[in-house]
Image (cartoon, helix red, strand yellow):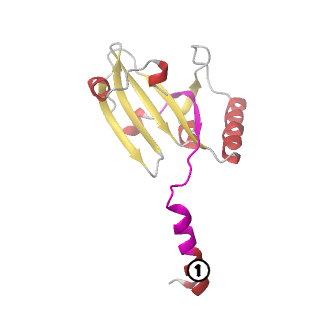
Amino acid sequence: MAASAGVDVTVAAREARRKRLFRFDPKLKLMSVVDERDGRLVISVKGAPEEVMARVTRMLVDGAEPPVTDGYRAHVAGVMDGFGRQGLRVLAFARRALPPGAGLPAAREEAERDLCLIGLVAMQDPPRPEVPEAIGQVHRAGSASTWSPATTG
C-alpha cells in the first residue's frame, strides 16, 4: 500500500531514517517507530484500533489536525464495528511529529501519546490452509472427552 502511494519501502531507506523501534507488544497491541523526516522526528504507531484510539487526541482531515470529538470517536467505533461484522481485520494508524530539536522518546509511553489518527485499514485475514484440519482434530478429540475451566484445579 505504501509503495503504491510512492513511498520508498526498501529496507535501506527505512533503516536510514529509523531512530527507534518499539516492537509489537501483544499486551498493548501496538508497535511504534520513531523516524527522522525532513529534519524532525516523527512517531508512527499502528495497532489494534481500540488501543490506538485510546492514545489519539487529533485526527488528520484535509491536511489539518483538529481535535478528536466524542462524536468522531463514536463514528470510528461504528466503522470498526462494521468492518468486524464483515469479518475483516482492522488496524489503526496514527502519528505525532515532535517539535524541532526534540530528543528521542526514552520510553514507549512517552512516544505513544497525543497522537493524530491517520486512518484505519481493513483487510481480509483468511485462515491458513491447515486450520480446517486442526479444527477437525479438536472436534474429534472433544467427542471422546470434555473439558471446561470448572473441572481444572
Task: Judge left or right: residue 126 versus residue 84.
Answer: left
The magenta stretch spans which residues?
Answer: 113-138
- Is residue 133 or residue 45 the one in the foreground? 133
Q: Is residue 70 magenta?
A: no
Image position, residue 28 (x, y; %) = 47, 47
Query: Vertically, is 49 above or below 67?
Result: below
Q: How many marks?
A: 1
Most distant residue in the bottom direction: 144
Q: Is residue 116 magenta?
A: yes
Image position, residue 99 (x, y; %) = 39, 17
Image position, residue 125 (x, y; %) = 55, 47
Residue 83 visible to an observer of this rendering: yes
Residue 148 visible to an observer of this rendering: no
Write the residue at 53% across / 67% down: 133
For residue 10, which quarter of the picture? Answer: top left
Task: Judge left or right: residue 21 versus residue 94.
Answer: left
Write the residue at 61% across / 83% down: 143
Q: Which residue is mark 1?
A: 142
Image position, residue 92 (x, y; %) = 55, 35
For residue 151, which quarter of the picture? Answer: bottom right
The amino acid type found where label 1 is placed reads Gly
Query: Vertically, is 130 above or below 6?
Result: below
- Is residue 14 or residue 50 the one in the foreground? 14
Question: Crowdedness of circle 1 by 10 Å Cα count: few (<14), some, many (20+)?
Answer: few
Query: Does dot 1 land on a helix, a strand or a loop?
Result: helix
Write the residue at 62% across / 44% down: 88
Task: Judge left or right: residue 141 versus residue 16.
Answer: right
